[in-house]
Image: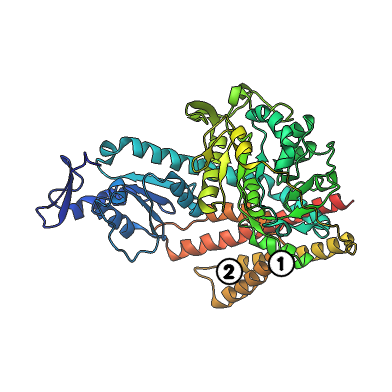
Amino acid sequence: MNDVKINIETSRSGYPTLKINELYIHSRYNPVTEVQEAAKNNYKPHHLHVLYGYGLGYLAEELINNFKFNEPLLIIDPLIDEGLLKLKETTYKRVYNTNSGNFTKLSSYLSELGSYSNKVHVIIQQYYQNLFPNNLLEVLKHVKDSQIRELYNINTINLFSLSWQLNSFVNTKYIYNDSSLEELFNKYDAPVVIASGGPSLIKQLEMLKENRSQFILICAGTTINTLLKYGIYPDYVVSVDGGEINYSHFKDINSEGIELLYTPTNNRKIRECFSGNGFVFIPSGLNSLKSYYEKNTNKNFPLILGGGSVAHYAFSIAKKITTGPICLIGQDLAYTNDMSHAEGNKGIKHYSELDNEIVEVESWDGGKVKSSDAFKTMINTFEQLQLLDPHINEVYNCTEGGAKINLISQITFKSFIKKYCANSVNKIVLPKINKPLFDFEVFYHKEVENYQKIIELLKKGIEITGKEKGPFFSSKVLNRLSKIEKKLNALYIEYNVDSLLEPIIIKNEVKFLPKINESRPEEFERVKNYTITLYQDCADRIEEYIKKLKIEME
C-alpha cells in the first residue's frame, strides 16, 4: 500500500483523528461525538454487524455501546492487515477481526456465527469505499454468499427434517450390522480419486478406466450411473441425501464389489441396493445423532465435515482414509458446455432449463464460466474444508473444466496419474461379521413409547405456562418448568429428535426475539407465548412423525 499516506493528527477537541491521503476518516473537531448518531442509526438488534473500516476505532466503540443483546461485531480493515493501524483492546467478548483479503476465513467466521448469517448488517466507515473499492466489493459479495448459504441451509432443514428423522430411524437396522467408517481410517497410503458428476467428468473417463487399478476410487453419490455406464466400478460410493429421488439413482445398479459409505439420514431404501459392506459416519455438528447411535449399537462413529453436496463429504472422507495424494475430477460446480451434469447422470439438464440465477465465476483455466449461487456456495464450502482440515499430502483439482476452487492446486488428470499412479493398489475388504439379529419391532415400540413421554411433558408445560397471569412468572412455576425442560432436553438427545425439532426451534427463536426497552409485562407475554407456541409446535411435529412411523412399519 505504497499509495496510502497515513497521518494521525490532533482534533480541536484533543482526540486523535485520522487522515488518509487527503481524506479525514474521523472528524477534525470531535471524532467521539461525531460517531454517536451514526452508531445509533446503524445498530440492528439481533444482527451480526460487519464494520468495513476501523480507522482509530471510534465507530466500533460506539456501536458496542449501543448493543443490547450481546451482538457480535466483525471488523475488516486493509490497513490493519498491513500493520498501518491497530485494534484497540476491548473488554467486549464478541469482537472479531479478519484479514480483508482472506475471503475463505471471512466465510468461515460468518459460518461460525451461524445464527446471525441470515441477519447481517454491513457498515462502511466513511471514505473507505473510495480508498478500497475493489476489496470492499469482494467483501460484500462474500457476505451475500454467506447469507444465501444460510438461507439454503435453513430451507433444507425445514424441507427435509421429517424425512431425515424417518431415514435415521429405519437405517438403525442396517447400522446395527454395518461398520463404523473409522475402520477405514488411515488404511491406505495410496492415491485417491474422487469422481463427481460434473460435465467435465466425460473427458476423464477413458484415462480413469485405463488406470483404474492404480488408485482408490470414491464415487460422489449419483455419479455412480455415469461410471457404471462406462464400465467403471468405484471402490466406495458416498451417499448422504435423504430424498426419494436419491434412491431412484441407485435402485437398479449393479453394486457388486462396491461398498457404501453413508449417514443415518441417507434415504432408508439405498442400503439394500448394496450387497457389500457398509460404513457409517455422522455429519459434523450432529453430536446428539452420534451419541444416539453409539448408545444403540455400541460403536464409535466419526464426525465428518461436509456441506451442501455429497462431494464435500467424499472429500473429507478421502483425507481420513489415506495418507496419499487426492484428486477431484468432475467437480465443475458450473454449467460447463451449458450442462449441469455429465452424460449418464439421471439429473442432467441444460442451464437454460433451470430457475437458478446464472452468475459468472473464475474458471479452471483462468477465464469465466457460468455458475449459480448454489454452486458458489459449494465452491466456498470446498475452500473452507481445505482451510479447516488441510490434508497431510497434496490435494489437486483435476477437473479440467468448470470453476476454480481456491486453496486446491490445479493440474491435469494425466499429470496426476503420471506423478502418483505407478503401482497397483489393493482395496482393503473387511470380513463380514455375523452379529445377532436386530429386533426392529421391539426397537420401534420402545422408541414410540418414549416419544409419547416427550409429548406428555410438552403438554404439561403448556398447561403450567397457560395458567400464569403475569406480570411475571412465579418462582414455583419457573421451578416446575425448569424441571420439565431438563427432562425434555435429556429425552431429545437420548431419543434423537434434535433434527426433527430444529426447524421449529429456529422459527420460534426468531419469532419471539426480545424488543429494545421491553417492559416487564411485555417480556412476560413474549416468554409465555414463546413457551406455549414452541411446546405445541414440538408436540404436533412428534405426533406427525409417529403417524409416519406407523405407516412405515405397516
Q: Secondary structure at mark 2?
A: loop
Q: How far across and down, in percent of the image, does residue 158 sit?
A: 64, 47
Q: Amino acid at mark 2?
A: Glu
Front residue (pair 516, 266): 266
Left or right relative to 545: residue 121: left
Q: Residue furthest front?
A: 422
Q: Position of residue 381 (x, y in %)?
A: 55, 44
Q: How many marks?
A: 2
Mark 2 or mark 1: name the one nearer the start of the chain. 2
Amino acid type, label 1: Glu
Q: Nearer the viewer, mark 2 or mark 1?
A: 1
Q: Residue at x 41, y 57 (%)?
A: 71
Q: What is the CA distance from the residue labelled 2 to the residue labelled 1?
A: 30 Å
In-image side of 170 versus 519 (left or right): right
Residue 494 - label: 1
Secondary structure at numbered mark 1: helix
| 524 in relation to 105, above or below | below
Return the residue nearer the eye: 529 or 406: 406
The circle on residue 382 is none
Q: Is residue 373 left or right of residue 25?
A: right
Residue 540 appears anywhere in the view: no
Q: Position of residue 525 (x, y in %)?
A: 52, 61
* Residue on which disc 2 sits: 468
- Residue 430, image x, y percentages: 81, 56
